Amino acid sequence: MTTLLPAPRVTLSRLHAPTLQTIPEAVAENVRRVRATCSARIMAVVKADGYGHGAVTVAEAAVAAGAEWLGVTDVADAVALRDAGFTVPILSWLNPSGADAETAAALRIDVAVGSVEELRQLIADAVDPVRVHLHLDTGMARGGCPLDDWEELFRTARAGRGRVEVVGVMGHLPRADEADPRANAAAVLRFRHGRDAVLRAGFGPVLVHLAATSGALTDPGTHFDMVRIGAGLVGIDPSGATTLAGAARWTAPVVHSALVPAGTAVGYGGAHITERETHLSVVGVGYADGIPRELAAEAAVAIDGARYPIVGRVSMDQIVIDTGAVPVPRGTVATVFGPEGGVVPSVQEWARWAGSIPHTVVTGIGARVQRSVA
Ligand SMILES: *Cc1c(COP(=O)(O)O)cnc(C)c1O
């Protein structure tokens, strides 16, 4: 027989929990900055839980600031947005868990199709018409229909009339991290060609969309009817051409502090040895929370207007910082990154320290980091 023990009365420490705070006003500001350079409609792309910032929070701010569409990679994510009350058009373009035709039709979730096979499946499954966007591979070989199969895709769509309705044409630019329009010129040309073929095939009015954040900010020739903005919403310009507003602040508590002598080995493997007597503080976030394990020596967090370096190896749940002559009491709140600049590290700095891109920093933050909204 199993006896259920009464729940123990644990008094949890009253430390500030590791928290990622999303800043909706920054998302709105970023939508306005895109709007200032681009008159096409804006689709707010909130895949990967709104690039780690919370899909619903980011979508709400973006739609309130003028985004007319939402974009995700999976129909299930689109369903979650409908459940949250969004009524704007939603496009889902990858559907790794399968595009459920019935759900897509019932909830008016548009589906992008990038192959004849995918389209046939959708037609076979559909009862009520599903709105589809034909997705052309514009030179990336990562999803999208090759130009060689484009006409076959049209024939399939035409044969499936009544079960699918073609409402859009999309492509995606391979050189998202280059601000020079010449880098994508061949892709744009191929896309125009593919778009013209769709119009000739007589599908009726279609929404034409190619650019993501960097195209929207740097190359008007890529704008067409709509731009799909994801990274830009949360303050990341992949082209590096502009500075956008950081949309999150990640904080975590100091959980332990000590004054140690010179020659102290810090963390696993003793990878760092203190050169002088110094204060060390343990901050309660580690690689399980999304702190990259491989970091440059400059990697740091901010406390009370000063930046302190991370020393020794990043552990699963904790990092150690060297605060020199400054004793930092347990419970002090450290800022891992934030939008303010100055001593507060930015997401972009973390990406450099990790030898990666800002996207991996914001999408890699673990589930136990609490989420809040400013
Ligand atoms: C992620 C994605 C976007 C958004 O790209 P950003 O550079 O983050 O703005 C747009 N379109 C497609 C197909 C995507 O996968």
Image (cartoon, rainbow, N blue to C red):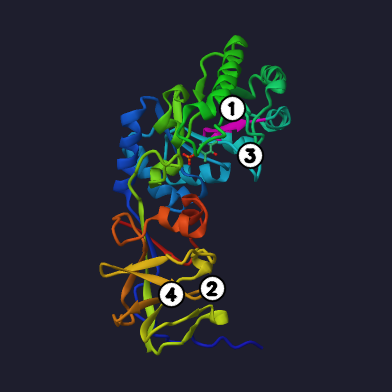
As drawn, the label of residue 132 is: 1
Q: Say what amino acid the circle numbered 2 marks.
A: Met
As drawn, the label of residue 284 is: 4
Quickly name the residue at label 2.
316
Q: Say what amino acid the circle numbered 1 marks.
A: Val
Residue depth check, mark 1 versus mark 3: number of the one nearer the observer: 1
Quickly name the residue at label 3.
100
Residue depth check, mark 3 versus mark 2: number of the one nearer the observer: 2
Residue depth check, mark 1 versus mark 2: number of the one nearer the observer: 2
Callout 3 touching callout 2 (CB < 8 Å): no
Which of the two residues, 250 or 105, is positioned nearer the viewer here?
Answer: 250
Residue depth check, mark 3 versus mark 4: number of the one nearer the observer: 4
- Residue at coordinates 52% horizontally, 43% vertically from top-left? 79
> In the picture, which quadrant includes the N terminus?
bottom right
Q: Is mark 1 within 8 Å of ligand 1?
A: no
- Residue at coordinates 30% horizontally, 41% vertically from top-left? 29
Q: In the image, 116: left or right of 162? A: right
Q: What secondary structure is marked by label 2? A: loop
